[in-house]
Image (cartoon, rainbow, N blue to C red):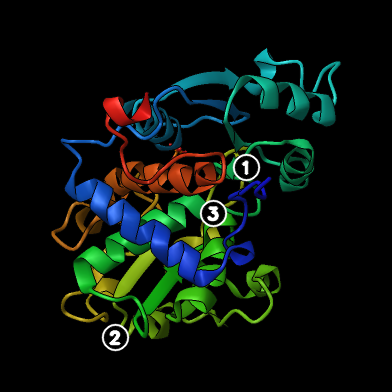
Amino acid sequence: MKPVRHFIDLSEIPGDTLRGILAHAHDLKKNKFNPPQIFKGLSLAMVFDKRSTRTRMSFDLAMKQLGGHTVVMNMDEIQLGGAESVESTANVLSRYVDAIMLRMSNQDMMKELSRHASIPVINGMTNQSHPCQIMADILTIEEKLGPIEGKKVAWFGDINNVSNTFVQASKIFNFDLVLAVPEDLHGKAPKGANVTADAKAAAKNADVLVTDTWVSLGQEGKAIEKFWPYQVNGALMNLAKNNAIFMHCLPIHEWEEVSEDVAKSPASVIYDEAENRLHVQKAILAWCLENAGVSLQETPDSEAE
Ligand code: CP
């Protein structure tokens, strides 16, 4: 039997595999009005312990547009976390569906579930990482600016799951990443990350300026005063390259981490980024399901019979 392919952390997956997933996402996007029915008869379970617009919509539509089905549950609606163990949940879901997508704060619990599952587990965001988002971001950067290798990507604000995954991606895809964050947060950055407290130096000659909300889901009431020097605004954008783009995984906490004029400027690619979640999700699902017998090529009905 072929090994089960989980998609939990970018650092666990070979770079050429991630490149292949991005190339497939690009092809699927080109053919978005003629989607290959490669997930016919397959089902994805999705479990959420936090709100979602993009992750929920894009995984749901990714499965359905390619011929599959989905079942969506909120964490407080299932037995996991109540009477049922992670092991039992993993075993039961493995008998019903062909893959599981989890938005689960606790990444250790997600990994435990993946160890017991006989089907792929996909990380739809934990408190530690957000790999599907960063794959969509890389697709977007390459669409707008060409190969990401050697580009300068400047992150502003807090250290969080998105910045952690950018750090992993910078090593895999060979781009220069600088994290501009308040001094007292430098110790929170992943080991080996290039961190500065100087937002202007980070923005200088950057190809990409990226930020995320300073108050993540579950951190309501957090003090934000120290983050104001890291707001992506016109002054920071003016220090970047002429063709620099602004990115944000959304939702924006209006208008804290980014000024309204930048978020709505021609340099802003936030909605392309959101759309690319759909194309990337399809390619991630296809890679995960390939070892379960999914062909990346559509099989005509007559041949399948
Ligand atoms: N960027 C992102 O993951 O969006 P949602 O929280 O809406 O899924």
Using the image as rendered, state which of residue 33 and residue 240 is in the foreground: 33
The answer for how far apart the CA atoms under marks 2 and 3 are is 27 Å
Mark 1 or mark 2, which has the lower sequence index? 2
Between circles 3 and 1, the one closer to the viewer is 1
Whether ligand 1 has any atom under 8 Å from the Cβ at mark 3 is answered as no
> Mark 2 — residue?
205
Q: Residue at x 61, y 40 (%)?
A: 120
Q: Dot 3: few (<14), some (14–19), or many (≥20) neighbours within 10 Å?
A: few
Residue 224 is labelled as: 3
Image check: 185 left or right of 171? right
Query: In the image, ligand 1 is in what quadrant?
Result: top left
Give how far across and how far down residue 211 sits, in percent: 42, 60
Amino acid on which the number 2 mark rests in the picture: Asn
Between circles 1 and 2, the one closer to the viewer is 2
Mark 2 or mark 3, which has the lower sequence index? 2
Give how far across and how far down residue 159 sits, in percent: 59, 63
Whether ligand 1 has any atom under 8 Å from the Cβ at mark 2 is answered as no
The answer for how far apart the CA atoms under marks 1 and 2 are is 33 Å
Image check: 230 left or right of 258? right
The answer for how far apart the CA atoms under marks 3 and 1 are is 11 Å
> Mark 1 — residue?
219
Quadrant where the N terminus is found in the figure: top right
Task: Please tell me whether mark 1 sits on a helix, a strand or a loop.
Answer: loop
Determine which quarter of the picture holds residue 101.
top right
Vertical order, 16 against 281 (above or below): below
Q: Residue at x 27, y 55 (%)?
A: 26
Given contact means CB atoms under 8 Å apart, are the residues at marks 3 and 1 in contact?
no
Q: Residue at x 36, y 45 (%)?
A: 277
Q: Dot 2: few (<14), some (14–19), or many (≥20) neighbours within 10 Å?
A: many
Given contact means CB atoms under 8 Å apart, are the residues at marks 2 and 3 in contact?
no
Task: Please tell me whether mark 2 sits on a helix, a strand or a loop.
Answer: loop
